[in-house]
Amino acid sequence: MIKLYNNYINTFRGLSKEVWWLSLITFVNRSGTMVIPFLSLYLTKSLHFSLADVGWIMSFFGLGSVVGTWIGGKLTDKIGYYKVMLVSLVLTGILFVFLQYAATFNEFCFGIFTVMLVADAFRPAMFVALSAYSKPENKTRSVTLIRLAINLGFSAGPAIGGLIITGIGYVGLFWMDGITCVLAAFLLLQVLHPKKTKIQDEVKVENPVSAYDDKAFWIFFLAMFIFGFVFMQFFSTIPLYYSENRHLSEFDIGLLMGLSGLFIFLLEMPLIKWLEDLKMSKIKLIASGLFLVALSFIILNLTGWVGILIIGVLLISIGEMIAFPFSNAFAIERAAKGNQGEYMALYSISFSLAHIFSHNVGMQMVAEYGFDTTWFAMTIFALVGVLILGYLLRVLKKEDL
């Protein structure tokens, strides 16, 4: 047991203090993001919107994310990652509080678009900061540590969110989201001010390559869009499936989704360290993760046994544990030859675009064809993504010749 503990601790060694601080800021911010996992339930149960309306609202969620990520990437290259992160956190906190007052369909579409525009400007800035704070050999593990912070927050957030809904209603979630964003901004101001940080890997390129002219990166972008499209069902149609098909309460849904975060928190870093030591291609690993995500959907159609929900959560969790860190690391490596903010914005935009279409298409499919057909479709789409990653592997090999 002691040896196992020591081996686990050793997987965290060598990471800079700045990466640890950035992880703590991310944890504070993410643990308060309780509205998002319950958004589809809030819109249907509290505001009484139809599934079709919810789908369109989630499209505005994604559209705001796309615009915000693009702006965040541009601003990061122009004014630096620190200023972008700080302003994004403060304004997001304020906007989350005001979002609770949006009551009509048009108001909520505008509100969620604005919130996500400001909130997701943070993402490319954070990725560039992470790259700067990490030594080249530690970048994948640094990404993994950030994800651990996200998932630890995600583990606590939905469970606490379920309690808040039960106790004082959905309005409490908006206040908690707002307060934790501002707290994260205050922490950033205290510990990661440029005068207090040490840059580990500052990338300066004389003639930077544009991400928009990188063919291999566009193929990667398409695969990540598919991955995001399928994976994000976990935050919209899956909670509805738990509620309407499996008849779980909000508290039970929070615990089940929190299980994913806890599982990832405990096992992701050792898993990534082990996979790194195998020296496998990052693209092959990403494809393996996407394949597991595909399995997590198809098994839901196999049986009515409630335990299959836990198996599904574990499969999608292992899939994202593998796919997210290595896709992020691949993007960071590719960005080293160009405008970092541009590359990391494009990587983030692949998921933001998925937000636009994923939730809407998922909701429309559930409303029209039911959950079983939707899960079959998601499985097939994920497998298409696996094939695209196989093609990307061939393109990358030709580049190396």
Image: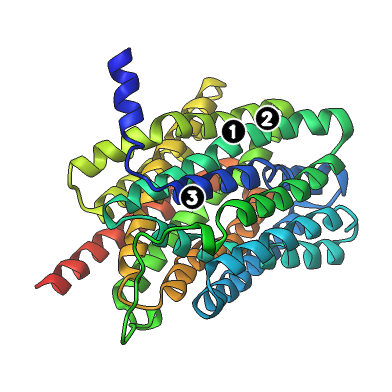
- Give the farthest residue toward the front: 195
Q: Tell me the distance, in whole angstroms, between the alpha carbons under discs 3 and 2.
A: 27 Å
Q: Earlier in the sequence, mark 3 or mark 2?
A: 2
Q: Is residue 251 above or below residue 89?
A: above
Q: Is residue 50 above or below residue 303?
A: below
In the drawing, what numbered circle is on residue 378?
3
- Residues packed near mark 3 inside 10 Å, few (<14), some (14 to 19) or many (20 plus): many
Q: Is residue 259 visible?
A: yes
Give the image location of residue 290, x and y in percent: 38, 48
Give the image location of residue 232, x and y in percent: 55, 50
Q: Is residue 185 above or below residue 370?
A: below
In the drawing, what numbered circle is on residue 155?
1
Callout 2 touching callout 1 (CB < 8 Å)? yes
Q: Earlier in the sequence, mark 3 or mark 1?
A: 1
Q: Amino acid at mark 3?
A: Met
Instruction: Mark 3 vs mark 1: give the one in front.
Output: 1
Residue 95 relative to residue 168: left or right = left
Which residue is drawn at the image coordinates 31% and 87% (left, top)? 207
Tell me where residue 219 sits by quadrant: bottom left
Judging depth in this view, the residue of 179 and 151 nearest the camera is 179
- Give the farthest residue toward the bottom: 207
Dot 2 falls on a residue whose secondary structure is helix
Q: Amino acid at mark 1?
A: Ser
Residue annotated with mark 2: 159
Which residue is drawn at the image coordinates 87% and 36% (left, top)? 169
